[in-house]
Image: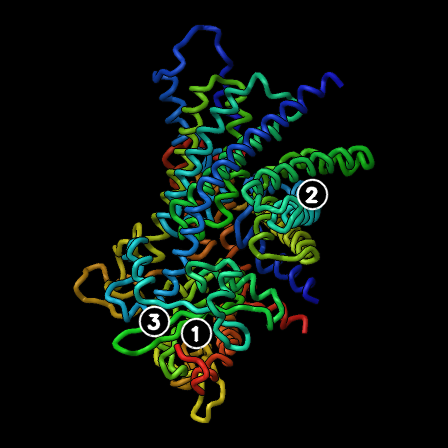
C-alpha cells in the first residue's frame, strides 16, 4: 500500500511538471498538439521508470560508503546519473527502432530531447533526497512519469483550443502558455492537502 | 574496431580527467564541508534558545557561533534507555569532538529503537538549566526536524527551532520562516497535572487548550500535522531520560 | 534556435582574445532579441523554482554564468577531437563536471544556501541553455567567441531570473535581498508599525508559491514582446 501511496503522491501531489516545474523546455516546445504531447509523455514515463531504479542501484552499490568501493563517491553522482540517462535514452531509441518501427516513428524524434529534460535528472535527484528504497523508487519513477504525462497532455489540449481565442498579440503562443501553466499549477496545489495514506485506508 | 578505438579512448580519458578533478576538489573541500554541516546544526540548536541569547543567531558569524557553543552548551549522547554514554564509549564510536552534534538522527532512526542514539544539549543561564532535544519527522514533501528546549522541570517548553528539507515556500516553510509560529510554543507543557504525557498539538482553526495547543498555519495542514506527530513521537524517546533525571539517577 | 548566429571558423588570422563589434553582438544579443528564456524558451525549468528570493536567484545566475562560459570554452577547445558518435555524452560529462565543481564550492562557501538550492544546482546540467549553446555555437566556433557567447547567454538568463525574483520577493515577502522594503515593519505578519509609509502592504503569499513564477514570467514575456514587436508569435 505504501507503494501505491508513493505513486499517487508523485503523480498528483508532487507533480514534476506542475509542482516543481521541471522539464518545462520540452513541455512548452512539444505541447502544440495533443498527438505529439502524448508521444513525448509516454516516452518520459518509460525513461523515468527505467532510469530512476538504475540510478538507485548505482547510488547504493557503487557510490555510497557501504558500496562496492567502500568510500563516499557521491561527488560523481551528477556525472554517472546523466551518463546513465543519456545511454538509456540511446538504448531505448535503438530497441524501439529495431522492434517497433511504428512506435519509433511516433516517439523517435522526442527521445533525444528527453536526455536534457530536467524532469528525468530531477526525478533521480529527488529520489536520492527522499531516501527511497528500491521498490519505492520504481513507484516514484512511474508515478512521476505519469504525472508529467498528464500535465503535458492537458496543456496541449488547452493550447489546441486557445488558438481560436482572441489573445493579445504579444501574449500569443509562449506568454499565454506560461500563464495557463500557472493556473494549472494553482489547481494542482489544491491536491496538496490530500493525505494519500488516508485516501487508501 | 579501429574506428571505435579512438572514441572509446577519448571517452575514457575525458571521464578520467573529470573524475580526477572532482576527486581532488572533493578531498580538498571535505574538511570545510564537514565544518559547515556541524556549524549549520549548531546554529539550529542555538536558535531554539535564541531569545535567551543577547543577539539573534542569524547575525552571528561562524566563529561566534562556534565559540558560544563551546562556552555555553554541554553535549551528551543518550541511548534508548536514557543513559548517558560514557566518554570511552563515545571515543570508540569515533565521536571525539562535538559528540551530540555528530549524531545523525536520520541515520539513527533507521536502526532498531534499542540501538538508536539521541543527542542532548544542556544550556545554563542564571543558574537554570535548559535541556535541548532533537526531534525528527515528516512534513508534506520531505523531512522536518526541530530542536526543543525544555526548562529544568522537564515539562515547560523554553523555546523551539524548526527546520525542513523542502516544505512549500510561503506555506509549510513558514514553520521556519515565520518566527511567530515558533514563539507560540514557549511556555507550553508536555505533561498534564497528573503527569500524563500530552505533548503539544498544532491545532487547525486555532488553539483551544492554552497549555497543550498552538495555532496551525493556514494552507499548511499536512506540515502542521507532521509537526504534531514529530513532537509527540520525538519527545517521547527522551522519556526514560526524564524519569532518570527526576529520580536523581542521573546528575547533569 | 532558428535565428541563432552560427558562425563558421574563419581562416583569417585573428588575435585569440579580442573585444570588437562581433564580441559585443555575441554578448548583447541574448539580452534582448535572442533572450534564452523569453525568446528561445530554454532553461525555464530551474528558473522558476529558485526565484522566491533574490539571493537564491543571484547565486543560481552566477552558477549558470560560470558553467555556461566554461563548458562553452572547453567544448570549443575540444571541438576538433570529440568523436561524433559520443558528442552528447562528451558534452554532458563536461557540463556535469563543471556543475559538480559549482556544487562542491557552494557547499564549502555557503552551506545554508546550498541546502536551500538543493537539487536545483544539479539541474543546471539539464538546463537546456547550456546544451543548446554547446550544440549551436561552441562546436563550430573558436574558444574566445564561445566563451563570450556563453557569458552573453547566461546573462540573458540571469536578467530574467533576477527580474522574476525581485518581483516575487518584493511582493511575496516585502523584502529585497532580505532588507525590509514594504509591508508591516519590525515584525513579520503582526505588529504593523505606523512609522513607515509603506507599512500598509501585506505580503502576498501567492507570490512565494510556485505558480506565481509562471504568471510573472508570462507577464514579462508580454511586456517584452509589446516593446520588441518583431518577436510576436504569428503562428
Quote the CA–CA distance across marks 2 and 1. Answer: 42 Å
**Outermost residue toward the front?**
B88
> Are dots 2 and 1 in contact, CB under 8 Å?
no
Which of the pair A99/B113 is nearer the observer? B113
Q: Which mark is residue B123?
A: 3
Q: Quadrant of the N terminus of chain A?
A: bottom right
Q: Is residue B218 visible?
A: no
Is C200 placed left or right of A190 in the picture?
A: left
Given the current orientation, which residue lies at the most extreme right position? A99
Marked residue nearer the N-terminal end (1 or 3): 3
> Disc count in the image?
3
Cα separation between marks 1 and 3: 29 Å
Q: Chain of mark 2?
A: A
Quadrant containing the C terminus of chain A in the rendered view: bottom right
Disc number at residue A43?
2
**Residue A70 drawn at (x, y percent):** 62, 47
Q: Which residue is mark 1?
A: B216
Same chain for the residues at labels 3 and 2, yes or no?
no
Q: Is residue B35 above or below residue A9?
A: above
> Would you say C31 lies left or right of C93 here?
left
**Residue pictured at 46% horizontal, 22% vertical:** C146
Q: Is residue C199 left or right of residue B75?
A: left
Mark 3 touching mark 2, by CB under 8 A?
A: no
How far across and how far down the image is residue C221, in percent? 43, 40
Q: Residues within 10 Å of mark 3 (few under 14, many from 20)?
A: some
Element on which disc 2 rests: helix
Amino acid at each position: 500500500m505504501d507503494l501505491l501511496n508513493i505513486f499517487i503522491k508523485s503523480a498528483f501531489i508532487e507533480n514534476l511538471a506542475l509542482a516543481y516545474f521541471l522539464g518545462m523546455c520540452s513541455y512548452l516546445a512539444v505541447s502544440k498538439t495533443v498527438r505529439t504531447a502524448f508521444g513525448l509523455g509516454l516516452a518520459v514515463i518509460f525513461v523515468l521508470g527505467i532510469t530512476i531504479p538504475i540510478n538507485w542501484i548505482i547510488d547504493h552499490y557503487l557510490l555510497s560508503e557501504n558500496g562496492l568501493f567502500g568510500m563516499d563517491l557521491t561527488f560523481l553522482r551528477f556525472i554517472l546519473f546523466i551518463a546513465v540517462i543519456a545511454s538509456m535514452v540511446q538504448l531505448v531509441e535503438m530497441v524501439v527502432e529495431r522492434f517497433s518501427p511504428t512506435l519509433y516513428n511516433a516517439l523517435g524524434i522526442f527521445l533525444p530531447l528527453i536526455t536534457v529534460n530536467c524532469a528525468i535528472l530531477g526525478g533521480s535527484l529527488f529520489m536520492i533526497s527522499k531516501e527511497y528504497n528500491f521498490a519505492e523508487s520504481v513507484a516514484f519513477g512511474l508515478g512521476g512519469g505519469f504525472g508529467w504525462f498528464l500535465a503535458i497532455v492537458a496543456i496541449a489540449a488547452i493550447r489546441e483550443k486557445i488558438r481560436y481565442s482572441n489573445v493579445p498579440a504579444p501574449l500569443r503562443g509562449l506568454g499565454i502558455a506560461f500563464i495557463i501553466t500557472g493556473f494549472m499549477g494553482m489547481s494542482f496545489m489544491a491536491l496538496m492537502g490530500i493525505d494519500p495514506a488516508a485516501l487508501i485506508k | 574496431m579501429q574506428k571505435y578505438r579512438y572514441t572509446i579512448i577519448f571517452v575514457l580519458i575525458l571521464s578520467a580527467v573529470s573524475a580526477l578533478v572532482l576527486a581532488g576538489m572533493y578531498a580538498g573541500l571535505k574538511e570545510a564541508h564537514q565544518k559547515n554541516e556541524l556549524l549549520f546544526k549548531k546554529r539550529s540548536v542555538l536558535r531554539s534558545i535564541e531569545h535567551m541569547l543577547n543577539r539573534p543567531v542569524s547575525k552571528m558569524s561562524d566563529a561566534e557561533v562556534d565559540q558560544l557553543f563551546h562556552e555555553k552548551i554541554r553535549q551528551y549522547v543518550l541511548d534508548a534507555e536514557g543513559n548517558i554514554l560514557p566518554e570511552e564509549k563515545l571515543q570508540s564510536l569515533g565521536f571525539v569532538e562535538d559528540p551530540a552534534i555528530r549524531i545523525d538522527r536520520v541515520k539513527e532512526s533507521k536502526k532498531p529503537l534499542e540501538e538508536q542514539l539521541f543527542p542532548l544539549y544542556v544550556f545554563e543561564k542564571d543558574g537554570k538549566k535548559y535541556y535541548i532535544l532533537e526531534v525528527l519527522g515528516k512534513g508534506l514533501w520531505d523531512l522536518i526536524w526541530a530542536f526543543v528546549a525544555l526548562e529544568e522541570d522537564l515539562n515547560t517548553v523554553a523555546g523551539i527551532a524548526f527546520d525542513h528539507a523542502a516544505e512549500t515556500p510561503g506555506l509549510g516553510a513558514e514553520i521556519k520562516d515565520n518566527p511567530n509560529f515558533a514563539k507560540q510554543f514557549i511556555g507550553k507543557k508536555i505533561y498534564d497535572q497528573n503527569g500524563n504525557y500530552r505533548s503539544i498539538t498544532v491545532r487547525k482553526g486555532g488553539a483551544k487548550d492554552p497549555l497543550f495547543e498552538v495555532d496551525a498555519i493556514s494552507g499548511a495542514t499536512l506540515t502542521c500535522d507532521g509537526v504534531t506527530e514529530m513532537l509527540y513521537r520525538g519527545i517521547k524517546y527522551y522519556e526514560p531520560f526524564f524519569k532518570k533525571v527526576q529520580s536523581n539517577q542521573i546528575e547533569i | 534556435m532558428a535565428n541563432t548566429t552560427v558562425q563558421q571558423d574563419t581562416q583569417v588570422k585573428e588575435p585569440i582574445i579580442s573585444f570588437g563589434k562581433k564580441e559585443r553582438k555575441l554578448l548583447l544579443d541574448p539580452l534582448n532579441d535572442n533572450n534564452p528564456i523569453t525568446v528561445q524558451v530554454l532553461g525555464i525549468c530551474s528558473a522558476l523554482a529558485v526565484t522566491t528570493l533574490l539571493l537564491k536567484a543571484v547565486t543560481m545566475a552566477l552558477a549558470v554564468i560560470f558553467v555556461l562560459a566554461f563548458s562553452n570554452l572547453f567544448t570549443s577547445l575540444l571541438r576538433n577531437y570529440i568523436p561524433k558518435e559520443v558528442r552528447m555524452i562528451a558534452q554532458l560529462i563536461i557540463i556535469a563536471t563543471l556543475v559538480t565543481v559549482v556544487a562542491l564550492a557552494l557547499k564549502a562557501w555557503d552551506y545554508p544556501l546550498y541546502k536551500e538550492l538543493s537539487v536545483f544546482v544539479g539541474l543546471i546540467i539539464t538546463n537546456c541553455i547550456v546544451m543548446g549553446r554547446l550544440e549551436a555555437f561552441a562546436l563550430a566556433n573558436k574558444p574566445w567567441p564561445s566563451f563570450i557567447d556563453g557569458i552573453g547567454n547566461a546573462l540573458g538568463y540571469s536578467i530574467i531570473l533576477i527580474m522574476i525574483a525581485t518581483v516575487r520577493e518584493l511582493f511575496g515577502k516585502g523584502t529585497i535581498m532580505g532588507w525590509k522594503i514594504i509591508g508591516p515593519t519590525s515584525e513579520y505578519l503582526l505588529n504593523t508599525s505606523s512609522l513607515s509609509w509603506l507599512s500598509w502592504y501585506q505580503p502576498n503569499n501567492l507570490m512565494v508559491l510556485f505558480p506565481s513564477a509562471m504568471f510573472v514570467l508570462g507577464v514579462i514575456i508580454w511586456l517584452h514582446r509589446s516593446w520588441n514587436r518583431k518577436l510576436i508569435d504569428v503562428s
